[in-house]
Image (cartoon, rainbow, N blue to C red):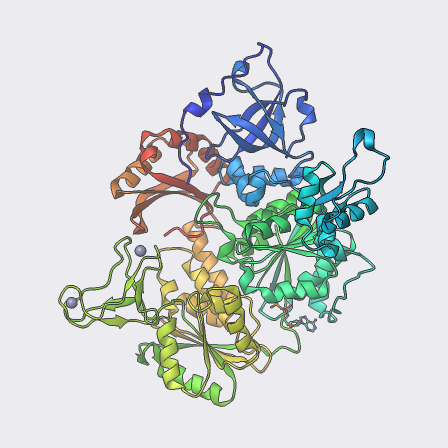
Amino acid sequence: MISPLPTELSTDLSTAAVDNQPSAVLRVALDMPRATLFDYLPPVGLTVAQVPLGARVRVPVGARERIGVVVESADHPSVSSSALKTIRAIIDESALFDAPLLHLLRWTAQYYHHPLGEVIAAALPKALREGAPAMSLTQNWRLRERGELAGLAAPQAPRRAPRQQGLLALLAAHPQGIAASEIAATQPSWREAARALEARGLIEHFDVPAADPAAGGVAPGGSTMQSEQPPPLSEAQSEAVAQVDAAAGSFAVFVLQGATGSGKSEVYLQCAARALARDQSVLVLVPEIALTPQLVERFRRRLPCPIAVLHSALSDAERLAAWRSARAGSARIVLGTRSAVFAPMPRLGLIVVDEEHDGSYKQHESGCRYSARDLSVARARQAQVPVVLGSATPAFETLHNLQRGRYRGLLLPRRPDQPEAPRLALIDLRAHAATQGLSLPVVEALRRHLAARSQVLVFINRRGYAPTLLCTACGWIAPCRQCDARLTVHRTAAELRCHHCGAAEPLPQRCPRCGLAVKPVGQGTERIEETLQQLFPEESLVRLDRDTAANAAELENRMRSVRDGSARILVGTQIVTKGHHFPGIALAVVLNADQGLFSTDFRAAERLAQTIVQVAGRAGREHSRGEVLIQTEYPDHPLLQSLLAGGYEGFATTALRERAAAQWPPFGRLALLRASALSPEAALEFLSAARTIAPEEHAVRLLGPVAAGMARRAGRHYAQLLLESRDRAALHRLLDQWLPLVGALPQARRVRYALDVDPIDIQ
Ligand code: ADP
Ligand code: ZN
Ligand code: ZN
């Protein structure tokens, strides 16, 4: 959240009153919720030109010292010279961020209207924000030069200290010094001896940049690592690789579109191999690491170079190590989730964004609300390299850019050895009653495929046992006390849980209002699992959702049981639609498609179609033609009809026409100002005041403010003001002028607010 900053900060930079000459200054971005840069004089004894742009520095801010990044220099300070303070220390001898990356960070701050210092901080591992060296260092030990005694006999250790004697002998044999790890290899428990000798002034330690462990195997053209042979490419794959390769050294955006299993990853791998052969490095973005261990493994097996993997589940130390090897250029491939788009990449040659439509590329919860997919395109443009956006179901923005000729399409048809696309059919829930969420035709299809020894997949986008706990006698429904939401029944855990704020309470047996028995209504994965187990007691079942696959290891265990065929029925949420290869699944069932048809969010239909197509992509991958059944109460709905008749493309054509008529993205541009407060009035008042002071810009429409779709969440009340325009420049002009005024509103003190440019969720 952006919140106003205490005003004293701007006035108390008051010490260094030296002379009245205008002085050249360095502008420093600090990790503070403020859009401006801070002016400082170079450290004593250095000129402005001697401080590298993109380096970290320690600067005084008020009474504290902070770490910031030097972003630019200026001939004249923007504050009075007498208020200027001096940089205390330079942390990095050379830029931490090279010029293109620094440029990307500035572009991000500008486009998303977010303080640069916070953008930079978010791009850095914690240890670097706190001043750790940009390179890893190893501790080395050596004999101390002993002034007048130098040249005399080696120092003596006490006779009865064999460890000290051994250590002295070892150091004497390595006059340049020897790494602590090497000492440890030959002399276990040497530390105590070292401390004793150091205390006597006989030996000393010093740090040197570490040989990056990741660097071990890099050997373009003469690898020490054994890499697996690639399969011969299909014609379409070769064509795709050739086009991307031909764009090397220039900016181009490719949309690699192909069903799951059509060979997109194979194209990434071979494009990456060619970039490596040119001695360039490759950035690969994936939606979620836990869901793509197979892709990581494939890169490892196939490419003869070290890979740095960057994602949110790393420890601070692991993230630091990965970042360092990326920056040192020893990891030639960086594979990571959203924030890896900011990874330092010397000699960047190619960017790949897998499953580019995936919502997790957009940060929409905190800090700078950036889209890593969009930033990867910006980064590719700045670095003049090609970027490949891969998906079976490209985002509408991406399709639109394709249609307008800004992006280039690479289509991968099914390979000859692949079965035909699965058959999609709707099950009309009005004609077939469902028991426990499963209609009779679905149960029959499940039975048929299981009898044929195939695997089946049941998709339901809701975890837990049931979404509602109801008292049929008095109508009471278990509510969350903190949110405008119902509590979800979790049977195994015997709890009621809120999926919005995380609140949990014991599952009651009786209605707290009238004392009669309560009952769970509706279905979640847990209940579907129970029902399927009753229907098919002899079949083994595995459930995949955030409750059963809480950690990567458990997720991988469960996925393996599906891959190797030991689990025959797979029940799961969105997790099952992402990036897995389950060759044995012949039938996929979508249980609740209707939520997406009537949502107030204009993107809901797009997401629904993507989900259905992705679920369908799991069916019939290597066996025979698969079957997909979609349960719905609205079989005539035009979106479902266009999806059935024309596939994702047909659906997208229909839906894009609707978007154009309504001027929704990608035909219009949106920005959403969200506010939350402890009272509903405060959030709305702030947004109304903000609306009143918005500069005149006739191309921009302001809609609202209104309470958010779910107005109360975790005890706070949310409201929003939507800005919409066909003209992106006009929208950003308005935002530039407006946001500083918004921050200065007195009402701003009573709320938390944040701007979301290109929001993907506007409910
Ligand atoms: P996608 O990324 O589109 O889902 P993959 O690249 O993972 O597709 O390919 C799916 C499967 O087909 C993988 O097992 C892969 O090894 C195999 N495959 C891909 N391309 C070829 C090819 N040209 N020849 C043989 N097998 C291939
Ligand atoms: Zn009751
Ligand atoms: Zn809640």
Does residue 369 appear in the picture of this structure?
yes
In the rendered image, the residue lying farthest to the bottom is: 451
Q: In this view, does 757 lie above or below 310?
A: above
Percent across and percent down for residue 306 are: 71, 57
In the rendered image, the residue lying farthest to the right is: 151
Q: Quadrant of residue 120?
A: top right
Q: Is residue 210 above or below residue 501?
A: above
Near-viewer residue (516 or 386): 516
Does residue 251 appear in the picture of this structure?
no
In the displayed structure, does residue 41 sit left or right of residue 653?
right
The N terminus - image quarter: top left
Q: How many labels does the image show?
A: 0
Near-viewer residue (142 or 21): 142
Q: In this view, does 749 lie above or below 166?
A: above
Percent across and percent down for residue 752 are: 36, 40
At 73% from the left and 54% from the top, the residue drawn is: 187
In the rendered image, the residue lying farthest to the front is: 160
Percent across and percent down for residue 172 are: 81, 44
Ligand 2: give its quadrant. bottom left
Q: In which quarter of the image is residue 200?
A: top right
Percent across and percent down for residue 595 are: 36, 64
At 53% from the left and 56% from the top, the residue drawn is: 313
In the rendered image, the residue lying farthest to the top is: 20
Near-viewer residue (633 or 299): 299
In the displayed structure, does residue 385 sit left or right of residue 585?
right
